[in-house]
Image (tube, grey):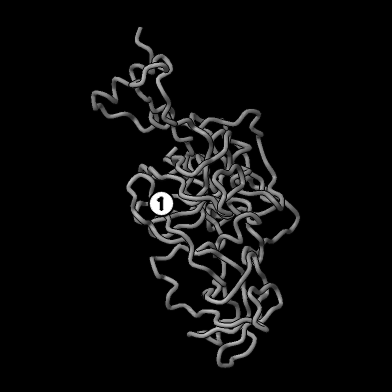
């Protein structure tokens, strides 16, 4: 007797239409071990964390989420106090907001703090920096030309003097230094230049040159460093999800200049908006397969080298996207993530 799975494979191979229900069942997300029947949302929760309680693959959240649309306008906005229920009754598990009867309780969404998709305390500093620019992209930005009392470097509380278009309507400025090129290790294309974030400065007085006070410094600040207006960080409200189309990116760099990193760390990837990468996309990380000598011919001078297959390592959540580069938070990693590793559609 032909197995149902074999019949399904043959049906697809022959181009026969497959009922939507059969496709859904074949692709049903896997529930996490000991998935609860319900979860009460509390402050400190994240969408990723809640999804991981119910699903082995948290990025499959959109596949199982059935919001009660008469209760919330945005299906990705969930608030402390909401109760999420796992419905196992159908072929595809579903997650829903429970209808909870309480003695008069009104939630004003405009003032309630919706839970973030991923840990806000980790990514918040990176929603406005680092900055990726074209070659010479900071050339016309205001620059520091002198320091307080001629100091070589400035720190918190020191004064800096800048020329250029320092708009007096901008209260806070980010200080950058042109960094190294971001080069695709496969195509060798220069994707942009990473500007090094040094700190922030506040407009002190509209003088000539303009006087600014350093209010925060991550690295030493000096003459020649550039200023850009500090934008307000965007709130990440995107549900974690896999891209619809294939993505084949490489890890370009780690924030902090190290060669390898792990979970809860920020990495730069070699794909961006032009490649269809969006905020909220989750990509699978693979350790790039090394080239090794054929061990059966180790004493042969002409022994061939063999490239080992890439090995699945973890997941990365993309939260900031430029035209040709994106930044993501490593959500899980079994081994160190290294420059050159692969990030693909899971």
* Vertical side of 221 occupied by 241: above or below: above
> Residue at coordinates 52% horizontally, 68% vertically from top-left?
177
| Image quadrant in which the C terminus is located | top left
Q: Is residue 294 left or right of residue 202?
A: left
> Residue at coordinates 29% horizontally, 26% vertically from top-left?
12
* Vertical side of 302 occupied by 119: above or below: below
Q: Is residue 96 left or right of residue 121?
A: left
Picture coordinates of residue 299 (x, y %)? 41, 16
Q: Quadrant of residue 8?
A: top left
> Residue at coordinates 63% horizontally, 49% vertically from top-left?
46
Which residue position holds label 1?
Answer: 277
> Residue at coordinates 45% horizontally, 42% vertically from top-left?
340
Q: Quadrant of residue 133?
A: bottom left
* Vertical side of 267 occupied by 156: above or below: below
Q: How many marks?
A: 1
In the image, 234 versus 107, the foreground residue is 234
* Vertical side of 101 occupied by 301: above or below: above
In the image, 31 versus 133, the foreground residue is 133
| Image quadrant in which the N terminus is located | top left
Picture coordinates of residue 331 (x, y %)? 58, 43
């Amino acid at each position: 007797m032909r197995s149902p799975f074999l019949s399904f494979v043959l049906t697809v191979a022959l181009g026969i239409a497959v009922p939507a229900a059969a496709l859904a069942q074949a692709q049903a997300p896997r529930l996490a071990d000991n998935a609860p029947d319900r979860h009460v949302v509390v402050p400190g929760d994240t969408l990723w964390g809640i999804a991981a309680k119910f699903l082995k693959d948290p990025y499959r959240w959109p596949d199982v989420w059935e919001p009660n649309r008469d209760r919330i306008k945005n299906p990705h906005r969930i608030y402390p106090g909401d109760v999420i229920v796992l419905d196992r009754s159908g072929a595809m598990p579903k997650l829903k907001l429970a209808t909870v009867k309480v003695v008069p309780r009104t939630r004003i969404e405009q003032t309630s703090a919706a839970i973030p998709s991923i840990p806000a305390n980790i990514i918040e500093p990176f929603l406005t920096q680092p900055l990726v620019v074209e070659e010479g992209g900071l050339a016309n930005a205001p620059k520091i030309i002198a320091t307080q009392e001629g100091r070589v470097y400035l720190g918190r509380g020191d004064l800096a003097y800048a020329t250029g278009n320092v708009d007096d309507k901008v209260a806070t400025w980010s200080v950058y230094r042109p960094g190294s090129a971001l080069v695709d290790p496969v195509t060798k294309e220069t994707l942009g230049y990473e500007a090094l974030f040094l700190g922030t400065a506040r407009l002190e007085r509209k003088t000539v040159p303009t006087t600014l006070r350093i209010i925060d410094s991550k690295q030493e600040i000096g003459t020649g460093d550039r200023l850009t207006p500090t934008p307000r960080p965007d709130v990440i409200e995107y549900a974690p999800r896999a891209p619809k189309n294939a993505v084949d990116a490489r890890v370009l760099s780690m924030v902090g200049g190290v060669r390898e990193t792990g979970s809860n760390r920020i990495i730069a990837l070699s794909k961006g908006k032009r490649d269809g990468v969006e905020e909220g996309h989750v990509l699978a990380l693979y350790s790039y397969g090394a080239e090794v000598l054929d061990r059966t011919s180790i004493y042969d001078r002409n022994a061939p080298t063999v490239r080992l297959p890439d090995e699945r390592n973890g997941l990365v959540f993309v939260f900031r996207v430029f035209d040709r580069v994106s930044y993501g938070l490593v959500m899980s990693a079994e081994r160190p993530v290294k420059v050159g590793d692969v990030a693909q559609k899971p």
